[in-house]
Image (cartoon, rainbow, N blue to C red):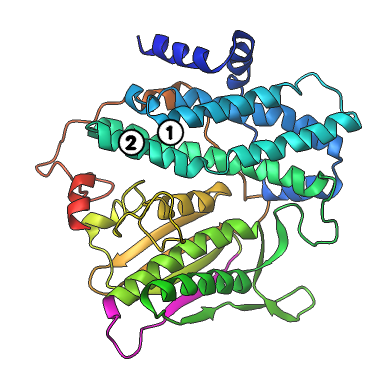
Amino acid sequence: MRLTAVARNLQKLLDPKSLKTLDHYSQFNPSPLTIQQFIDFGRTASEEESFTFLKKELPVRLSNIMKEINLLPPNLLQMPSVTILQDWYSESFRDLVTFEDTDSSRTTLLSFCQTLKSIQTRHTNVVQTMAQGVLELQESHKVDNQTDMAIQYFLDRFYMSRISMRMLIHQHTLLFEPDADLNTRRIGMIDPACKLKSVIMEAFQNAAFLCEEYYSCAPDIEIKGQTMVRNEKGKKVGLSLVYPPPHLYHILFELFKNSMRATVETHGKAAELPEIEVLLAKGEHDVSIRISDQGGGIPRHITDHTFHYLVSTAPRPSMTPTKAPLAGYGYGLPLSRLYARYFHGDLILNSYDGYGTDAVVYLKTLTHEASELLPVFNKTSTRQYRTAIPTADWTDPSFTASRGLHVSRPSQLKKAA
């Protein structure tokens, strides 16, 4: 019955020919690229080569995640926002496969570039629309633990897929669109010498501006550690990394917003707010950025859910705000962790209840190790949507050997928040 429902749902969205094409492309695994490959490709490849790669790779990535969308609980698939989102994805898939058997003439290349930009525009509000769909489900149906686990598993994969497709589309359009900026050191989205301190300060200042709007004050920053290193000529230069600056900015901006809100709400009446401390370190394999605050910390029973979508310790703002909210959607941390993990980095939190929190961002130092982390649609991923919650095998049902005690449920977290 479930497979029949899935097939029926896809048949509503796609004509028989497109449906057959979707089945074909979903049999292939995505081809992850390293930052080094992005750099080399951007420096040496032609627009024709990029077109030849993307007209196959984008449908593969799109079809993989479209197949997975249809494994979601039927109630969620029926939510208005999720229906809209599926329409967008189906339209984008149809647009892309029109190039399947075309040559790489100048007219085709211009049309392909325009199609990519149209897809980019169409998918602008995907994060908010999917979030709205989950909210619609929560407000209209009782969401049990098994359904919640399936949704959390899916959202990580869905948003990672989106990050990867936006990366591919941005690389192509930034390099090959008719008015592409060729007088830049960046290679598409990637900066071969991304100055970490510059990105840190930009993210900090913009978060401080928001914080001052809400609270009329904001903490200062102290940056320490390996802020300067010696280059191959022995000259001291600012610590840099080969990385897409927008991704790093997204991560840091979110972390600074969280630290500032916690600091101000904990010390709001103090004569002087404690600084937010940033530590930089670069080793052979990892670049580490630690952001430390004295914002009172997070209890362990809440910390376990800080990467849980739609859970926030701040009140939820409007989905269509008139000004940028400081916090509350419950998507900031899980999305930031995905951006860190996209090129095999990570984001972890260490919190000290009653004192403050350390957020540590890990990024790969070596470009050939910084490979895309992509979801694959297969039998293993399919089983994840049907796996039952295991029966408790400890006297405290919330205990798991890998995570310890105090794994609270989202309902308990909402009360605590």
Where is residue 221 shown, x and y percent of the image?
47, 80
Residue type at tag 1: Ser
Q: Are marks 1 and 2 in contact (CB under 8 Å)?
A: yes
Q: In this picture, which residue range is highlighted in magenta?
A: 266-283
| Quarter of the figure with the C terminus | bottom left
Residue 113 marker: none
Residue where numbered disc 1 is placed? 81
Secondary structure beneath label 1:
helix
- Quadrant of the rendered structure where residue 110 is? top right
Where is residue 153 shown, x and y percent of the image?
39, 36
- Quadrant of the rendered structure where residue 328 is? bottom left
When the figure is inspected, residue 210 is found, relative to residue 34, above or below; the finding is: below
Count neighbours of disc 1 (C-alpha within 10 A) and say few if under 14, some if 14 to 19, many if 20 or more. many
Q: Is residue 317 magenta?
A: no
In this orientation, does residue 265 appear? yes
Residue where numbered disc 2 is placed? 136
When the figure is inspected, residue 389 is found, relative to residue 310, above or below; the finding is: above
In this orientation, does residue 29 appear? no
